[in-house]
Every structure is written in structure tokens, then in C-alpha cells.
Image (tube, grey):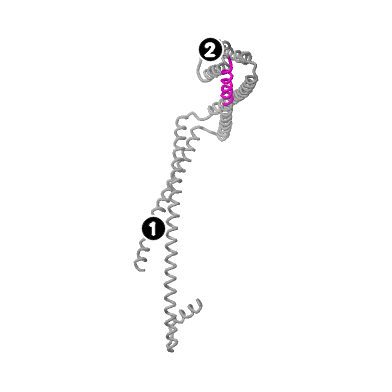
Amino acid sequence: MAEKTVKSEDEFGTILEKLGKVQAAMRVCMRANQDARKRAWEWRDRRDELRGETPVVHDEITKQREARDELNVQVQLQKKLRDEETERAQILQEKLRILRDEKSNRRDYISLEELQRQYRELEWKQQTMSLSIDEERALLEELEHLSQAMEKAPKTENQLIDQTKEQEELWQEVQAARTKAQEHHETMIALVEEAQQKHQQIIQLSGNLGPARTEADEAHQMYIQCLQEADEMRVRLDELRVEEIKYKTQLDTIRKTRKEVRQAREKAAVEKLAEQARSKQQTGQKLTMEELRALMETKGLE
């Protein structure tokens, strides 16, 4: 029993030491977290000061950014839907192609999908590249030419379809898919234009901000870095809390076991003293206060 008690004492001390180290580490993490967050707010204030962002301008920029970002999400959705319908139309078109006489009907013909692809490439070029006036004019003429060709393409394709039931049904599905693709494309273009307007408004509003943009951006990066440090400390603190709970639970278990052992020892001692008191009573000897108390406790237990 003594050896078990010594072992329990050693285990308790070891766990208590580990708990102390964990709690010390927690205090360090909490201080580091608070320090990182304090520095983050200081960098944020410095960034805003450099940008010269008044609350009104800042709120308006935030509002326009959120609106622009939401529009961009819708643009991606419409683009996805358009591409899905375009792909569906292409698959159906391929089925039609198998049913056509390629040699006699498609010598000089350019499919609507190819015209649309060329149109999107030129449209993308117009939106993303810096062109001279002559290049812009030539590109617009080519876009107009392709647009006219796309308007004529469905009629041309319709003339190339054999009048069979299967081909007619396929053609109707192709047309429906193309119509949906075009609707999604037009919606996407309208959303892009609206998003660009929002972006221009953001640029105009940003022009009202302070001139120290580079230093403000650096302050913003430090703000983000400090927040990341604070988050890392928070994550580490959560891990340490788990360890703290584990060690506290182990200590509580040991304390409970100790209490049960102590109570068992005390009960045994009281019973032994009560037995001694009963023996003395039988011989007429005088009882001590401890013996009387033990006798009363055991009778109460009975």
C-alpha cells in the first residue's frame, strides 16, 4: 500500500508539473495573441490614415466592392451555364454531323459554334488588349462580319439537315441549347458591363483617398500578417486547452482516488477505535473522548 501511495504521489507531481508547463505556455500564447491583435489594430489604423479613408468613402467603396464581387459571381454562373448549353449543343451537333453528307453539304461551311468561338476570341482580345484606332476599327468590322455570319448560320445549317424525324428532333434540341446559351451569354455580358461600372466607381472613389498607396498597402500586409499570427496563437491556445483539460481530469481522478483511500482508512480507524471502546465497556473501563466519538460514529453508521 505504501509503495502504491508513493507511486501515486510521484504520478500526481509529474502531472501537476506538466499542467503547470501547459498553463505557462497558455499564458504566453494569450499574451502573444493579445500583442498580435494590438499590433494588427495599430497597422489597420495606420493603413486607414495613409489611405485617408473617411468613413463615408470607405463604406461606399466597401458597398461597391461587394456589389461588384456579387456581380462577378453571377458572371461566372452565367458563363458556366452558357458553356454547359454550348457543350450540349456541340454534342447534339456532332450527332447531326454524323447524319449529314459531309462531302456534298459542308465544303465551305463554317459552323455556328466555330463562328461563336472566333467571335469570343475577338471579343476577348478587344476587352483585354490595348489596340490602336485602326486595329480597333478592323476588329469591330470583323466582329460585325462574324455577327452577320452567325445570324445566317442557323438558316444555313437548317438547309443542311436532312428531313428525317431524328434529325429534326436533334436540330430542335440544338436550337434550344443555342438559344439558352445565347441568353446566358447576353446576361453575362450585361453583368460584366455592370461589374465594370462598379469597378470604375471604385477607382474613382479610390482617387479620393490618400496618395501614400504603397505605404498603405505595406501597412495592410502587416495588418494581415499580425492577424495571422493572432490566429496561430489562438489555434495553439486551443490545443493547449485540450492538454490542460486532460491533465486536470487526471489530477481530479487521482484526488478522487486519494479521497476514497483516505476515507477508507479513516473509517477503518474509527471502527478499530470503536471496537476497542466496546471491549473496555465490557470490562468496565473508562472511555476516552476519541473512543466515545468513535463509538457514536459507528452506531450512527449502523
In the image, residue 203 sits, relative to residue 255, either above or below, namely above
In front of the other: 277 or 140: 277
Residue at image mark 1: 15
Name the amino acid type tagged 1: Ile
Name the amino acid type tagged 2: Ile
In the image, residue 171 sits, relative to residue 43, either above or below, namely above
Q: Residue at x 48, y 78 (%)?
A: 298
Q: Residue at x 53, y 28 (%)?
A: 206
The mark that comes first in sequence, 2 or 1, is 1
- Looking at the rendered structure, the secondary structure element under dot 1 is helix
**Residue 35: which quarter of the image?**
top left
Residue 8 in the image, given as x and y percentages of width and height: 37, 63
Residue 106 in the image, given as x and y percentages of width and height: 56, 12
Residue contact between numbered discs 2 and 1, judged by CB atoms under 8 Å: no
Q: How many marks?
A: 2
In front of the other: 225 or 209: 225
- Looking at the rendered structure, the secondary structure element under dot 2 is helix
Residue 195 located within the stretch drawn in magenta: no
Q: What predominant SS class does the magenta segment belong to? A: helix
In the image, residue 60 sits, relative to residue 241, either above or below, namely above
Question: Can you see residue 196?
Answer: no
Q: Residue at x 34, y 66 (%)?
A: 3
Which residue range is magenta in the image? Answer: 84-100
In front of the other: 17 or 180: 180
Looking at the rendered structure, which numbered label has been put on residue 27? none
In front of the other: 252 or 37: 252
Q: Quadrant of the N terminus?
A: bottom left
Within 10 Å of disc 1 (Cα), the crowding (few <14, some 14-19, many 20+) is some
Looking at the rendered structure, which numbered label has been put on residue 133? 2
Question: Can you see residue 92?
Answer: yes
